[in-house]
Amino acid sequence: MANFTFWRIKQLLIFLLIALAANFNYGFSSTYLNTSVDEFKIFLNSSYARRGQVLTESNYDLIWNLFLNCWPIGSFVGACISPILNDRFGRKVAFLVGNFFAFLASILQCLAILWYCPELLIASRFITSICMAISYQSCILFLQECSPTHLRGSFSFLSEVSYSSMTMVGSFLGQEYILGSHLFWLCFFPVPFCLIFTLTLFLLPETPKFLLISKNSEENAIKSVEYYHGLDSDAKQVLEDIRIEANCESQDSESSTTFQKLKDLFIEPHLRRALILSIAALANTIGLWTMLLSSTTFLEDANVESHIAEWSSTVMSLAYVFGTITGGFVIERFGRRKLLLTFTLLNNLALLAFIFFAKIHNIIDPLKYGCIGALIAYGYTYGTGVGPISWFISSELVPQKHRSIAQSVAGATDTIMVTVSTLAVLPLYDVIGSYAFLILYSIPSSISMIFLFRYLPETKGREIHDIVNELKNK
């Protein structure tokens, strides 16, 4: 019993390490700007003042917007590069490449601060966004392909647990009284961790599915299964299930190049259906970025006091973290389909509640505080089911050969949706207020829910080949 308990703890730590290796820098870099924005603006002005230049308002806005918006552009580029690395060189190599160059980019960010070089800061942030997209895609593939089937959902949730935790850490450390007024140390914070995670990844075996299907190495695949599932696992049976998955996809086509696999996604009906389901699920996630970046602004617009609005945004981030932890515990009990649909509905209701309270406060002012409750509910419901499942469900709907490219296309599409909505929400909010959420988030989410309810199969406790066959028969 003691040995079993020790193994379960060790196994959890292995998968938590995989999740943190991708999401530590990713989550931190997504939010540390939000609370240290004033200090970064001072840095920009000081940098150009040292060159004898004075920034005009328009030039300043151009540089700042470039600094902020290079992240989604880099994420899109990284998502496009990811399947080439993951399929050609393996999940481990892609993971290492993403983390190593993110480590170098983090060093460049620190040097940019020391040298007062905004151009280098923008370039390094852009490189980081590309690398983090590659690492994140590799992380999901690792969690999905290495996990025992009965724990695949719980271990996949660790990605969102680690990401949400690091977004909260980034916001906290970016506060002026912590590291927000010390930009060098704020940018330096992830550097040693990037190095540690990169070095640790060298010790992890490649995923058993890639080793058996892509490399045809049964001996190494068995070692990988024993490493991730335990020495007492039935490695032969695991490999047999992997072979069935491989046979399932080899009957469809002899695809080998990335372009051919991409073509298959749109030609093969079951792959096309899986892709549409994946994008439909991710359509429910696009509102989170707006809430993480601008929730304080929306609360202040509803006449909530500034200090309460800032505190409430922090509580929403904390609720997001607790939601991911809750979801990780219950997903193997209730399943992906039920959890995703239920909490997407609750997430939409939270958003509608925010719209209601933001409007009704003009008549009954104390009801403005209902916006805070709605915001916290939004964070919790998103973390419990909407975000985590939407990001890994694509990997459970397609066979190994097309898994990386399907995940990449879905992720790239999500990046486009997030970029468009993020750019549109503030101008639209100025015109029609909180109804902007209805147009940009609630209505598209409701449409996606209908499609998911109709076509999304339950994937809990099922082998991938069984899920793929169900999609083929629909």
Image: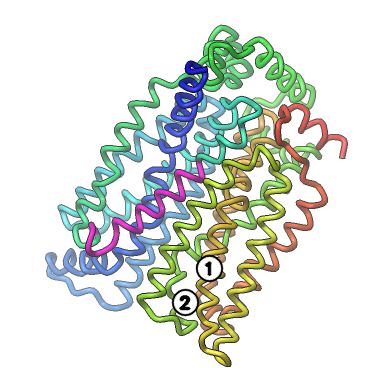
- Neighbour tally class for label 2: few under 14, some 14-19, many 20 plus, Cα within 10 Å: many
Query: SS of the residue at dot 2?
Result: helix
Decide: marks 2, 1 in contact (CB < 8 A)? yes
Q: x%, y% of residue 176?
A: 24, 64
> Disc 1 designates what residue?
375
Mark 2 vs mark 1, CA separation in Å: 9 Å
Residue type, label 2: Leu
Residue that appears at 30% across and 73% down: 59
**Left/right of residue 105 with respect to residue 340 in the rendered view:** left
Residue toward you, 473 or 262: 473
Residue 299, label in figure: 2
> The C terminus lies in which quarter of the figure?
top right
Tell me where residue 140 appears, x and y as whole percent. Answer: 54, 36
Q: Main secondary structure of the magenta part?
A: helix
- Residue 176 among magenta residues: yes
**Which quadrant holds residue 162?**
top left
Q: Does the magenta stretch include residue 296?
A: no
Query: Type of residue at label 1?
Result: Leu
Q: Hey, which quadrant is residue 450 in on the image?
A: bottom right
Residue reaching furthest to the front: 1
Badge number at residue 351: none
Q: Nearer the viewer, residue 319 or 149?
A: 319
Q: Give the range drawn in magenta.
A: 159-179
Element type at mark 1: helix
Of all residues, the one furthest to the right in this rendering is 473
Q: Indicate whether 70 appears above or below 127.
A: below
Residue 417 position, x and y percent, is: 59, 59
Color scheme of the displayed model: rainbow
Q: In this view, does 107 lie above or below 420?
A: above
The quarter holding residue 251 reads top right
Q: Number of labelled discs?
A: 2
Left or right: 128 as drawn, with respect to 178: right
